[in-house]
């Protein structure tokens, strides 16, 4: 018999709505509260937010009400996130799963790691940062494939994203600098944070390979828009960044290179509205390449007829992965930060079959 877990959804943006939908559908999860920020969503039924039937759970902007709700787990999906808020939830005795940092914070942000670890111990619960990149495709999949390999010289994970239909200004502009001038991108206060972001999966892969990183390097290349481009997160003006190519590299002490690369762009694959073109094999998805005494290339593609549908599917994966993690996170012991290296396999829940009566 599976345990049933009481879940709170905290923030209902694009990824929060995907996890909310997954919680409502999952027979092993019970939605008990929803925290929202926008006054328009305050007081609405959670089902209404995601176009489903009534759940009889009313969304609230009041964090105190949420913290005092009896629940096993909070799926925490705001933008921006707040480490003190995460700690308050943990100390209230609720596990936290989030697509926000901190996936493997021990090297890049040991201060936050310590705060979260202490809060977990005080609340007797776990913290797990999930998602898709970071949080799934970025490190879990390369590590899984590494189990098929012997000597590994290089692991490269490249994300391709035509982001015209990703409507989060916070993620697209504030975090990823699309639509900003190169000077604005260079002076973005979250620049170092972004480097930590991409170095965390690199550290997790190194740890999974029973190694450690001895040298980090990073490159930020971009291509400017050659004309105004209309997108779901606003107009990308001519002369601002229309394609971002972030490349973060970690070198292990044994000489394995671990590369995290993002190519996020605001045009279709023709790139006719950009100043220059890059070689981009797919408009959304990921390519994972392991090189060594065997070479593996695995392409993860989103299969839908239109680009907006592929973008929506890509973002949904993030929220679904969070919701699917609830049972393994609630059941992990002892209390603390749980990375993918600490947890059993996360699978989807569809129901049960009786094979033998
Ligand atoms: N790991 C991954 O693979 C991955 C992928 C995508 C996103 N993410 C992360 O997931 C988080 C959510 O992303 P998203 O795409 O869902 O973003 P989003 O669509 O911009 O949603 C963010 C939500 O945050 C809430 N919010 C509004 N004002 C806020 C404030 N001042 N402080 C805190 N929260 C506020 C709102 O919730 P309400 O609408 O309920 O009012 C808003 O809808 C981000 O932190 C992002 O970095 C991770």
Image (tube, rainbow, N blue to C red):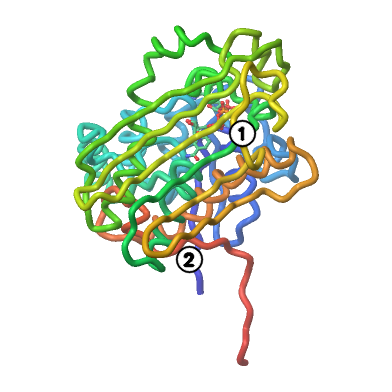
Mark 2, secondary structure of its residue:
loop
- The residue shown at (54%, 56%) is 298
Q: Which residue is mark 1?
A: 14
Left or right for 133, reference 123:
right
- The residue shown at (42%, 40%) is 260
Q: Is residue 328 above or below residue 162?
A: below
In the rendered image, residue 72, in percent from the top left (x then y), is placed at 42, 51
Q: Residues within 10 Å of mark 2 (few under 14, many from 20)?
A: few
Q: Of marks 1 and 2, which one's residue comes earlier in the chain? A: 2
- Camera-nearest residue between 118 and 267: 267
Left or right for 175, reference 87:
right
Question: In whole angstroms, how far apart are the C-alphas of marks 1 and 2?
Answer: 28 Å
Between disc 1 and disc 2, the foreground one is 1
Disc 1 residue: CB within 8 Å of ligand 1 = yes
Mark 1, secondary structure of its residue:
helix
In the rendered image, residue 81, in percent from the top left (x then y), is placed at 42, 28
Q: Which residue is mark 2?
A: 3
- The residue shown at (62%, 92%) is 357
In the rendered image, residue 261, in percent from the top left (x then y), is placed at 46, 37
- Camera-nearest residue between 13 and 90: 13
């Amino acid at each position: 018999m599976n345990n049933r877990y009481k879940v709170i959804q905290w923030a209902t943006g694009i990824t929060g709505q995907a996890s909310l939908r997954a919680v409502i559908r999952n027979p092993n999860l019970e939605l008990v509260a929803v925290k929202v920020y926008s006054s328009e969503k305050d007081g609405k039924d959670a089902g209404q937010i995601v176009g489903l039937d009534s759940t009889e759970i009313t969304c609230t902007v009041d964090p105190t009400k949420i913290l005092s709700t009896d629940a096993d787990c909070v799926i925490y999906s705001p933008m921006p996130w707040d480490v003190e808020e995460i700690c308050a939830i943990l100390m209230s005795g609720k596990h936290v799963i989030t697509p926000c940092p901190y996936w493997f914070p021990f090297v890049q942000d040991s201060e936050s790691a310590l705060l979260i670890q202490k809060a977990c111990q005080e609340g007797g619960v776990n913290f797990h940062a999930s998602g898709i990149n970071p949080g799934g495709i970025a490190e879990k999949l390369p590590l899984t494939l590494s189990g098929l390999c012997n000597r590994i010289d290089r692991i490269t994970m490249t994300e391709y994203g035509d982001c015209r239909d990703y409507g989060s200004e916070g993620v697209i502009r504030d975090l990823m600098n699309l639509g900003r001038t190169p000077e604005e991108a260079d002076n973005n206060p979250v620049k170092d944070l972004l480097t930590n972001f991409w170095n965390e999966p690199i550290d997790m892969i190194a740890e999974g390979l029973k190694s450690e990183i001895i040298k980090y390097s990073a490159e930020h290349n971009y291509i400017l828009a050659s004309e105004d481009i209309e997108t779901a997160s606003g107009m990308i003006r001519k002369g601002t960044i229309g394609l971002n190519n972030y490349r973060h590299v970690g070198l292990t002490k044994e000489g394995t290179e671990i590369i995290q690369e993002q190519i996020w762009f605001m045009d279709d694959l023709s790139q006719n509205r950009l100043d220059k073109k890059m070689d981009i094999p797919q408009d959304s998805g990921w390519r994972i390449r392991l090189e060594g005494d065997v070479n593996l290339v695995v392409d993860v593609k989103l299969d839908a007829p239109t680009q907006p549908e592929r973008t929506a599917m890509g973002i949904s994966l993030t929220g679904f992965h969070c919701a699917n993690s609830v049972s393994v996170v609630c059941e992990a012991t002892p209390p603390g930060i749980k990375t993918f290296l600490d947890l059993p396999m996360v699978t989807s829940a569809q129901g049960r079959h009786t094979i033998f009566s």
